[in-house]
């Protein structure tokens, strides 16, 4: 018998709407699962049991009354702790913000609630989400359910572990350097970093208004165990919101090319660093799945691939150098060590160089857009190495730089505003390996379609019990 906590968000919504199960039963099943497995992985930092139970009773009353139901009516979700949610602290993993409670929901929480979803918990992230390993000053270390000695990635690492272990069927995270996709890859689940502007974002803790890289590169988006649930979450979240001046109205997907099959460029060993052969093998398996489904699979040659990854770091790093004096007193020693190691290798730049970063970024956006005219998708690893052991990223200055190197494939979508779906491509030595499907701006649909083909061919890995 399939337990309720093993079912997906869309499946649960259908069962609740048909009165095959109550929202109260679904919420209780997930609260029980949290109690059972969270002590082993430390993914959920705050359990909203009382509030969730109250909302579940209200959801069941609405079903009984024949009310119009949202697409996630009565379904539990989890929310990363750096996303504003009324009644729960937006603490960013910091002791200094342990009691900081927003007075208004972030747009993504607002839309999930409007669709009927019920938040049951908040999930861990590293201090200010500035590390690709989830270990916060406030809540400590989140462990990978596939191997408790290895990282879940970051910064939405709590979400990754919560979803992978069945504590939640759908979660909200955000991404300025792979933070929706790093944990998806490490934990064997799915996610999408949407095109910039497709999903609105706004916060009050701290204020939304940040430096240029924090305006132009981060996004918020859904994480789930299946691509279908990621797609459902994205459909709930999209559209213009008045609190986000970059947000865009929803537009129907453009038609697919009729004169040729969709073309996928593949990078099994991406430029800019080394790639573990075990990872390359899983990328080839994903490429074979797409070829078998009728995609035209070719060698990838996107414009200035290695240069784009370096420009992402230069852009983000320039703003971090400016912000670091304000951030450093709030961050843990480990978080500061990681940033110090990375920034020491990438010194501050002057205004002229910063302007050149923005100009080069625009040129790359144009070049990639032109490249996508003939090649619809780019398939790469998510990480070019397997999930590392806890503490590796700060074990030496070189290890910090190696960590940046292994995430290089996730950075292009942030720099260029592209959609980037992550889906599991199987296991290597017992650890998950995720692959990315990057597409042209606003072709989030093509990225998800291809990710779903890979998922159907290679299978889903979760939910699992911690190992």
Image: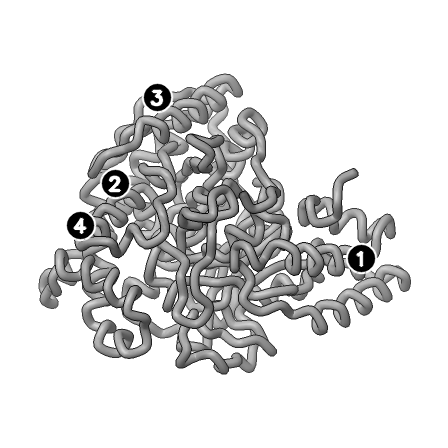
Q: Would residue 413 be found to the left or right of residue 180 on screen?
A: left
Q: Nearer the viewer, mark 2 or mark 4?
A: 4
Residue 295 in percent (x, y) is at 46, 22
Tag 3 residue: 298
Examine the rendering and report whether any part of residue 259 can be seen. Answer: no
How would you rate the neighbour count of disc 2 (Cα within 10 Å): few for under 14, some for 14-19, many for 20 or more? some
Residue closer to the observer: 260 or 417: 417
Residue 74 in percent (x, y) is at 75, 59
Alpha carbon of mark 3 to alpha carbon of mark 1: how far? 48 Å
Alpha carbon of mark 2 to alpha carbon of mark 4: how far? 32 Å
Alpha carbon of mark 3 to alpha carbon of mark 4: how far? 34 Å
Of helix, strand and loop, which one carries label 4? helix
Tag 1 residue: 25
Q: Residue at x 54, y 27 (%)?
A: 458
Examine the rendering and report whether any part of residue 401 can be seen. Answer: yes
Q: Residue at x 39, y 70 (%)?
A: 137
Q: Quadrant of residue 39?
A: bottom right
Dot placed on the residue nearer the N-terminal end, 2 or 1: 1
How would you rate the neighbour count of disc 3 (Cα within 10 Å): few for under 14, some for 14-19, many for 20 or more? some
Residue 440 in percent (x, y) is at 39, 41
Dot placed on the residue nearer the N-terminal end, 3 or 1: 1
């Amino acid at each position: 018998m399939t337990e309720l906590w093993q079912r997906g968000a869309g499946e649960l919504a259908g069962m609740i709407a048909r009165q095959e199960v109550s929202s109260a039963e679904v919420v209780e099943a997930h609260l029980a699962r949290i109690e059972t497995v969270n002590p082993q992985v430390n993914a959920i930092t705050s359990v909203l049991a009382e509030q969730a139970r109250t909302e579940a009773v209200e959801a069941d009353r609405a079903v009984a009354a024949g009310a119009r139901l949202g697409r996630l009516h009565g379904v539990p979700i989890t929310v990363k702790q750096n996303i504003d949610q009324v009644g729960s602290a937006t603490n960013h993993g910091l002791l200094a913000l342990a009691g900081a409670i927003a007075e208004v929901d972030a747009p993504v929480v607002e839309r999930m609630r409007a669709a009927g979803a019920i938040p049951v918990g908040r999930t861990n992230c590293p201090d200010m989400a500035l590390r690709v390993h989830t270990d916060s000053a406030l809540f400590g270390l989140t462990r990978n359910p596939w191997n408790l000695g290895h990282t879940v990635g970051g910064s939405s690492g709590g979400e990754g572990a919560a979803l992978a272990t069945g504590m939640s069927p759908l979660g909200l995270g955000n991404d300025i350097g792979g933070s929706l996709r790093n944990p998806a890859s490490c934990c064997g689940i799915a996610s999408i970093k949407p095109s910039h502007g497709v999903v609105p974002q706004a916060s009050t803790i701290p204020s939304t208004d940040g430096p240029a890289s924090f305006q132009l590169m981060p996004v918020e988006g859904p994480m789930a165990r299946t691509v279908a649930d990621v797609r459902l979450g994205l459909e709930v979240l999209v559209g213009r919101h008045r609190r986000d001046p970059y947000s865009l109205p929803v537009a129907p997907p453009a038609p697919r090319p009729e004169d040729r099959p969709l073309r996928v460029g593949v990078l099994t060993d991406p430029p800019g660093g080394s790639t573990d052969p075990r990872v390359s093998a899983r990328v080839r398996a994903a490429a074979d799945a797409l070829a078998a489904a009728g995609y035209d699979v070719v060698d990838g040659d996107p414009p200035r691939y290695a240069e784009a990854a370096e420009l992402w770091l230069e852009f983000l790093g320039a703003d971090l150098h400016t912000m670091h004096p304000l951030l450093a007193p709030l961050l843990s020693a480990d978080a500061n060590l990681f940033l110090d190691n990375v920034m020491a290798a990438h010194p501050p730049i002057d205004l002229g160089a910063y302007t050149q970063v923005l100009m080069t970024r625009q040129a790359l956006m144009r070049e990639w857009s032109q490249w996508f005219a003939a090649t619809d998708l780019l398939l790469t690893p998510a990480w070019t190495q397997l999930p590392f052991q806890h503490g590796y990223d700060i074990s030496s200055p070189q290890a910090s730089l190696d960590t940046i190197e292994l995430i290089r494939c996730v950075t292009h979508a942030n720099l260029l505003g592209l959609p980037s779906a992550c889906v599991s491509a199987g296991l290597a030595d017992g650890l998950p390996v995720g692959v990315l499907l990057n597409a042209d701006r606003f072709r989030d649909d093509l990225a998800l379609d291809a990710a779903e083909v890979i998922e159907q061919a290679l299978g889903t890995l979760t939910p699992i019990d911690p190992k």
